[in-house]
Image (cartoon, rainbow, N blue to C red):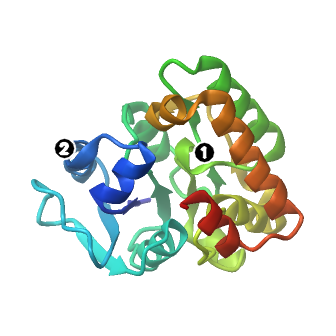
Amino acid sequence: MGISVVVPYVSSVELNRHLNHQGDAGISALIRWLAGEVDQVILSMDQATQVPNGVASGVCIVRGPKGRGGQIARGVERCEHELIWVLHADSSHLDHAVIYLRTLATRQVWGRFDVQLPGLNLVALMMNLRSRLTKVCTGDQGIFFTKSLLVGAGGFPQQPLMEDIELCRRLKRAAANAFVSPRITVMSSSRRWFAQGVVRTVLHMWWLRLRYFFGASSQSLYQDYYR
């Protein structure tokens, strides 16, 4: 079973504002590495973002309005392979994750990996434990799913924020027993956590999740998150 990877990416100005990336050099290195390891790489950007230097010519570039959920949804629409893996632009240490995905063969599954956050072992541990118990994943954990299950769940949610939460809701309703959470780690940047304060970041994210659970629109949460 082939693997398509979707990486949403926004401009360096926006990323610098929220301090959660490694810059153009980081995304270029990630895309080059993925191009040699998986069957298709899709870089989904807004109209204003320039393609990072050094991105391989075989990478599929998708453009559209800003907003990570919409960017991922547009990328998913272009996926040519059955297994789809969504990675944030600051993901790294992915070797073991790729090996695992190759073992899935023709299984119909969805799930995520354990996230590793440098310097935030307790935060990562709690995120992974919560996700394993609730089957609700975050984008930092490298969510993956088969195209068939996604179609049966109603497709990828085209919303500006909380797209990972909504996706898991849909997949849980459609195929809860197909969820897998291998004890394999992928690394994500801790920069945003330390820059904005660990406790403040945790409380802010839980506040947004709570509001979403009680019916707040993803658009209003997006405006709050990026103000």
**Left or right: 71 as drawn, with respect to 11:** right
The quadrant of the picture occupied by the C terminus is: bottom right
Q: Which residue lies at the image location 26% right of the left edge and 49% below the top edge?
A: 27
**Left or right: 64 as drawn, with respect to 25:** right
Q: Amino acid at mark 1?
A: Arg
Front one among 197 and 176? 197
Location of residue 173 (image quadrant): bottom right
Label 2 SS: helix
In the rendered structure, which disc, 1 or 2, sits on the residue that comes first in sequence? 2
Residue 90 in the image: state x and y as whole percent.
Answer: 38, 43
Residue hosting label 2: 25
In the figure, 71 relative to 31: above or below?
below
- For the residues labelled 1 and 2, the Cα–Cα distance comes to 26 Å
Label 1 SS: loop
> Extreme front residue here?
227
Q: Which residue lies at the image location 30% right of the left edge and 62% below the top edge?
A: 11
Residue hosting label 1: 112
Q: Amino acid at mark 2?
A: Ala
Report the disc number at residue 98.
none
Location of residue 61 (image quadrant): bottom left
Residue 59 in the image: state x and y as whole percent.
Answer: 21, 65
Q: Label 1 crowding class (10 Å Cα cut-off): few <14, some 14-19, many 20+?
A: many
